[in-house]
Amino acid sequence: MNRTFSIIKPDATKRNITGSINKIIEQNNLVIIAQKRIKLSKEKAEDFYSVHREKPFFQELIQYMTSGPVIIQVLEGDNAVENYRKIMGSTNPENADDGTIRKLYGLNIQENSVHGSDSNENAKIEISYFFDESEIINN
Ligand code: ATP
Ligand code: MG
């Protein structure tokens, strides 16, 4: 059993499809053990995506991630990090496998509906950046 950190991004909250995304998460044996709707500040978005600071798409990415509310989540299940990356699909929805969240709902390489941690180490860092342990209810 392990945990991953998820963000349902502004393109999805704008279209009111967060329930549809949560349904896919749950159908794939991940349990949403914490969830809140927030608006990312510019500072928090920049810090969260700091590995991409030098990329040409960075400013646009920050603009997008702060353009509306996001749902932040802690997901728990077997191989949660790997499992969720698989359910999300490729970064570019055009390349994502059928049935994945990004294939079903992603609009383009930027507005791709979801984020998921890419390693157990980053999952721990990202979860503790957004959630207090007391907000995570797993039993
Ligand atoms: P995430 O980190 O959000 O889970 P990812 O790991 O699949 O997605 P990254 O390479 O870490 O992809 O990129 C982070 C986010 O930056 C992407 O999810 C997407 O929203 C945006 N992004 C990535 N590449 C591009 C690009 N070439 N042009 C515009 N936006 C991009
Ligand atoms: Mg990433």
Image (cartoon, rainbow, N blue to C red):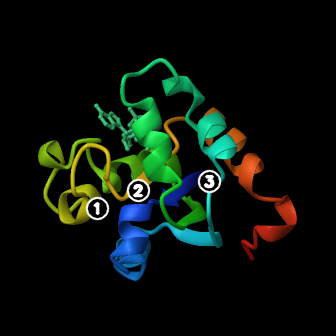
- Mark nearest the camera among 3 and 2 is 2
Q: How many marks?
A: 3
Measured Cα–Cα span from mark 3 to mark 2: 16 Å
Of residues 2 and 105, the one drawn nearer to the viewer in this rendering:
105
Residues packed near mark 2 inside 10 Å, few (<14), some (14 to 19) or many (20 plus)? many
Q: Position of residue 51 (x, y in %)?
A: 54, 24
Q: Quick one: which residue is furthest to the right in this view? A: 134
Residue 138 falls in image quadrant: bottom right
> Does mark 2's beta carbon lie closer than 8 Å to ligand 1?
yes
> Does mark 3's beta carbon lie closer than 8 Å to ligand 1?
no
Of residues 55 and 79, the one drawn nearer to the viewer in this rendering:
55
Q: Position of residue 84 (x, y in %)?
A: 42, 53
* First in sequence: mark 3 vs mark 1: 3
Tell me, yes or no, if residue 56 can be seen here: yes
Amino acid type, label 1: Ile
Residues packed near mark 3 inside 10 Å, few (<14), some (14 to 19) or many (20 plus)? many
- Mark nearest the camera among 1 and 2 is 2
- Asked if marks 1 and 2 touch (Cβ < 8 Å), the reply is yes
Residue wearing tag 2: 114
Q: Which quarter of the figure is the N terminus placed in?
A: bottom right
Amino acid type, label 2: Val
Disc on res. 101: 1
Q: Which quarter of the figure is the C terminus placed in?
A: bottom right
Q: Is residue 9 above or below residue 118?
A: below
